[in-house]
Amino acid sequence: MKKTFYILTIFTGLLATLVTGCSKSFLELQPRGTDLEDNFYKNEEQVFQGLIAVYDVMQWGNSGGYTMAMPLLTVASDEAHAGGSDASDQPSWVAYDNFTMHGNLGPQAGLWAKNYAGVYRANLILTKIQSADFLSAAFKSRVTAEAKTLRAYFYFNLIRWFGNIPLITGPIPTSEIYNQVQVPAEDVYAQIEKDLTEAIPDLPLTIPVSESGRLSKGAARAILGKAIMYQNDNSRMGQAAQLFNEINTSPVYRLLDNYAEIFRPDNQFNAESILEIPHSSLALWGDWGWINGGEGNVAPQFIGMADYNGPLYAGGWGFAPISLELVNFMKDDPRFEHTIIDGNALKAGGASYGERYQNTNYFIKKYAPLQAYRATAGTAELNWPINEIEIRLADTYLLEAEALLRSGGSATRAGQLLNAVRDRVDLAPVAATLDNVYRERRMELATEGHRFFDLVRTNQAATVLGPKGFIAPKNNVLPINQLEIDLTKGVLKQNPGYQ
């Protein structure tokens, strides 16, 4: 992923756009100067650089406030608290934790900006490809498929977080930028499904090591299956089950024998990983003013123990301390030790750390900052080379099991999938019921960013998160950033219940 500048703005979400030239590795980012958009896209290499610019947005963690999806969604669920130094440290996180968001408070500005930047970049490359008669057929079909999948990915994020959004699928005249109206959710989902359905045939089944991070058929099928699941229509669960089945029966993927191996930074893009966002310390980034320019993952720094002194881990900022509710739920499960850091045990062994706001003495382990991976140049806090595994095989196993049970499909197959996940950690089989599938998802995928959306899509959020302040359907989505509404002079409408 390498970079070249071109600038256009669509809402405040589409800020300065950075494109990079390609290196020997798909993951390496070494800037090679700048070009204006009008003078770009003249050969396959430049088109590929434009595609990498779309992928680049997936890595962003600071578009108008820290908005790293995994810890942010963990805080929004019942898995963790906001944390930090006090209640005024990252107030948007505190607001999402206790559901006191409004138009000017919450993580919505960054999430809107990031995902519409991704949409814009995907639309741009798709537009350029249409008139690029110099492209080989194979190159054009794959790049088109990747761009459509990325656009669907960003729109799936937007529809889940906001519910009520504009749908933009091509260039917008300057005079119309602030006249984009919100459309019914079903229109957005129809576009997501159209993009993914068209993309899947032209995506590769397997990705070579030199291209790790690029999208495959499995990733696109998983996003499509999740989009169908999120619409919560039982009449379509059979369709979702079939998509997940195509992934789950593919020889490309397998459950790793050892649960702990999934999250090791030196085991990236392993056989269980379906959609993984790469991060690297190669850029040696040092600019606090624009964290998105680097390739590192700032989430490990965010959730690490503050002022930590001891073995294995590096110090962090003390956000997202694990809730005692999750601790008690998982304490007898074999996955506990690979999911949660027990601060009390560390202290008993001689380690120390600062007990910050909402401290519980339990911390996220799956992507915690490890001393061995701390960057030795640049700003270390911005350069964690710890990837985000957004979709993995255990997730799609459990989604297929759920979809089968909700569609009246094979309960035997659902039980096999559910118990394969349990067998991996030496747990006894259980009956194939929705309650058991939901319980297993909570245990297996804890702190990976799935819990909040699982609760919303299964209509459990009001019951589970009500004690935190959650009100349905208001808090199913975030408010629209008030600045966006002001810029459009009221063309954009606020989500119901928010001010």
Image (cartoon, helix red, strand yellow):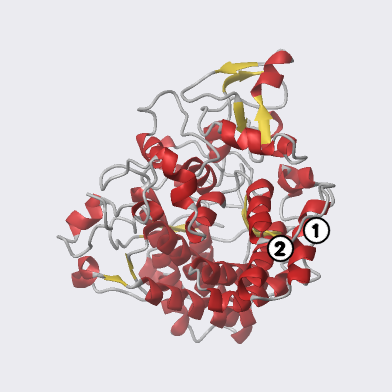
Amino acid type shown at disc 2: Tyr
- Tag 1 near tag 2, CB within 8 Å: yes
Residue at (74% x, 48% y) in the render: 262
Residue at (63% x, 49% y) in the render: 442
The percent coordinates of residue 478 (x first, y second) are 36, 52
| Residue under numbered circle 2 | 397
Callout 1: few (<14), some (14-19), or many (20+) C-alpha neighbours within 10 Å? some
Residue at (65% x, 49% y) in the render: 445
- Circle 1 SS class: helix
**Closer to us: 236 or 278:** 236
The percent coordinates of residue 120 (x first, y second) are 39, 66
Q: Is residue 206 left or right of residue 138?
A: right
Q: Is residue 85 left or right of residue 176?
A: right
| Residue under numbered circle 1 | 420
Q: Quarter of the image containing the N terminus?
A: bottom right
Per the model, the C-alpha gap separating discs 1 and 2 is 8 Å
Amino acid type shown at disc 1: Ala
